[in-house]
Amino acid sequence: MSETETPLLTSVQSLTEEPIKINSVARKKKQINGGDSESEHSAMAKGKGGLETAESVCEEGPGICAHLLTVFSLLLIVSTLPVSLCFVVKVVQEYERAVIFRLGRLLSGGARGPGVFFIIPCVDIYEKIDMRVQNFDVPPQEILTKDSVTVFVNAIMYYKVKDATSAVANVDDYGGSARLLAATTLRNVLGTRNLGDILSERESIAQEMQATLDEATEPWGVQVERVEVKDVRVPEQLQRAMAAEAEAAREARAKVIAAEGEHKASRALRNAAEVIADSPAALQLRYLQTLSSISAENNSTIVFPVPIDIISKMVSRG
């Protein structure tokens, strides 16, 4: 082996170090466990719903053709320097992550970024994932409540990608899937509640929806941070019926309050009459108070009440 080939092979080995290590570990595991490793791997795949995660790696490592293509790509990069740097060096922003596939295989180590990372143009492909919080306005859903009332409800969902590798490897379109699931969850949750509960318990409905969505989107690497019920609209006929019912309830309460006031006033008058009956001088004081209140209004005509006792005495004397 010549000295000029040594750095090139060293770089090749460093670029393909992780797949080679994984392949050797998988082969040792297969030699130790024999045929049991394949059954265990299939059982684990069935238990997880058939979804690959960032930690699951195929037992079969890259073959000879993959290594040859990698070496050929590296030779092509070295021979075309410095022009090849425009295709090898990639940059992702602070809020982005890059998931790299080498010859169709997901590279171990998770997503790259933020900052600079390197790829092999002829062998690697990558996909950028935005890690920022995104919002989705759930369109108005026609929902039949538990008490057979048709309402139109829309909501707002805030979500973000928590694991970029799972968002790429486990689901086709994580954004579209999360949005469809939000609309379906809104219909399912509100369909089990009455109209009064929907109008008065929006906070508890939002928390229930958030817990349901977060549990469903966890294998996709998506985290639902907040869900809010935006608006609840009822048909016009139902609005008129509800307004008439509320008006009737208010009138009934007003009548009850007025009756209670008259009852309390009558009891107070009864107590006052008993007090005046015990002390006749209190009646004269009441007459004087009435005269003072009448004279304060600057009326030209003053009505002076005459006690019935005086008139009866005058009549008896006559």
Image (cartoon, rainbow, N blue to C red):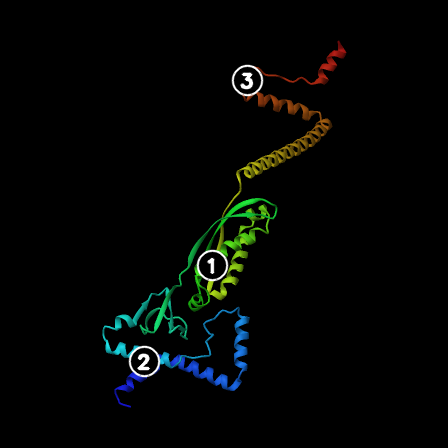
Q: To which residue does mark 2 refer?
A: 71
Q: From what the image shows, is residue 24 above or below residue 212? A: below
Q: To which residue does mark 1 refer?
A: 178
- Asked if disc 2 and disc 1 are in contact, CB closer than 8 Å, the reply is no
Point out the tag, 3 or 1, that comes first from the N-terminus. 1
Residue 13 x %, y %: 34, 83
Residue 229 x %, y %: 50, 50
Neighbours of disc 3 within 10 Å: few (<14), some (14-19), many (20+): few
Q: Residue at x 35, y 72 (%)?
A: 124
Q: Nearer the viewer, residue 169 or 230?
A: 169
- In this rendering, the label closer to the viewer, 2 or 1: 2
Marks 2/3: CA–CA distance: 116 Å
Residue farthest to the top, as pictured = 318
On the rendered structure, is 248 left or right of 75? right
- In this rendering, the label closer to the viewer, 2 or 3: 2
Give the SS element for disc 3: loop
Q: Which mark is residue 299?
A: 3
Q: Quadrant of the N terminus?
A: bottom left
Marks 2/1: CA–CA distance: 41 Å
Tell me which corner region of the image, top left, top right, bottom left or bottom right, holds residue 276. Answer: top right
Q: From what the image shows, is residue 310 above or below residue 57? A: above
- In this rendering, the label closer to the viewer, 3 or 1: 1
Q: Can residue 50 be seen from the camera position used here?
A: yes
- Inspect the image, locate mark 3, and give the three-letter code of the amino acid beneath it: Asn
Q: Quadrant of the C terminus?
A: top right
Point out the tag, 2 or 3, that comes first from the N-terminus. 2
- Inspect the image, locate mark 2, and give the three-letter code of the amino acid beneath it: Val
